Amino acid sequence: MELKISNSESTVTVSDDIFSRSFNEPLVHQAVTAYLAGARSGSKANRSRSEVRGGGAKPWRQKGTGRARAGTASSPLWRSGGVTFAAKPRNFGQKLNKKMVKGAYASILSELVRLDCLHVVEDFSVTAPSTKQALARLQELALDSALIVTKEADKNLYLSVRNLPGVEVTEVGGLDPVSLFRFEHVVVTRPALQEIEQWLQ
């Protein structure tokens, strides 16, 4: 299929298998869920009764004191005691094979093409860190907010858009399904588009 390059008469040829497939909602949902789960730190931790300090000796004798019997000061019932079901660091990551991941990305990109929300440009760069320049480039495309995808990291472009609400820059290697959904419009440079196509084949 052919994708028109914005503000130009030329087009770029892309694969139908990647940019013209039907939207697979269950697969996309699984990919998004797996990505969000992998982003969780899983670092929550509590100390169990065996890990808190003290508690080795019986606090007082079993009978005759008038107080409730107690066997250890590390009991979860006591202040500064251990936690009953102590949380431990865990990995929330979900396994998703490469074919499923590529299929989910292709499904999202195809939907963006159908909705006319994927804008291909020859180049999206600025000569210096300048919010004004970046805003002018977006206005050329009649956009106020967008995810800008470039082949390689561009420091000038990143510094130029970081103060623009609703605008974000990422390279192909940092592309994720959540960002593709979060932004209504996606601007991708021609070299980045070709690299994405090569990656998803």
Image (cartoon, grey):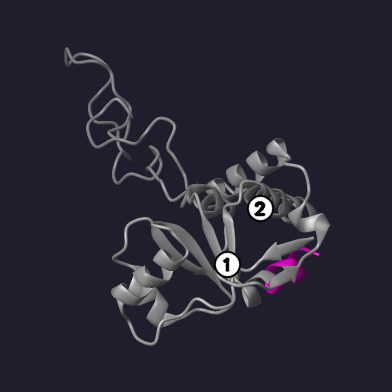
- Callout in the foreground (1, 2): 1
The magenta stretch spans which residues?
194-201
Q: Name the residue under label 2.
A: 113
Tell me where residue 27 sits by quadrant.
top right
Q: Which residue is drawn at 47% across and 64% down?
A: 141
Q: Does the magenta stretch include residue 200?
A: yes
Tell whether 193 sits left or right of 181. right
Would you say 50 lies left or right of 105 here? left
Q: Residue type at mark 2: give it.
A: Val
What element does badge 2 sit on?
helix
| Residue 26 versus residue 150 in the image, above or below | above
The secondary structure making up most of the magenta span is helix
Per the image, the residue denoted by label 1 is 6
What crowding class fits label 1: few (fewer than 14 Cα within 10 Å), some (14-19), or many (20 or more)? some
Q: Is residue 117 above or below residue 141?
A: above
Residue 128 in view in this figure: yes
Q: Position of residue 65 (x, y in %)?
A: 17, 16
C-alpha gap between disc 1 and disc 2: 13 Å
Frontmost residue, 93 versus 173: 173
Check if residue 93 falls in the magenta segment: no
Residue 100 location (% of width, % of height): 76, 50
Of residues 38 and 113, the one nearer the viewer is 113
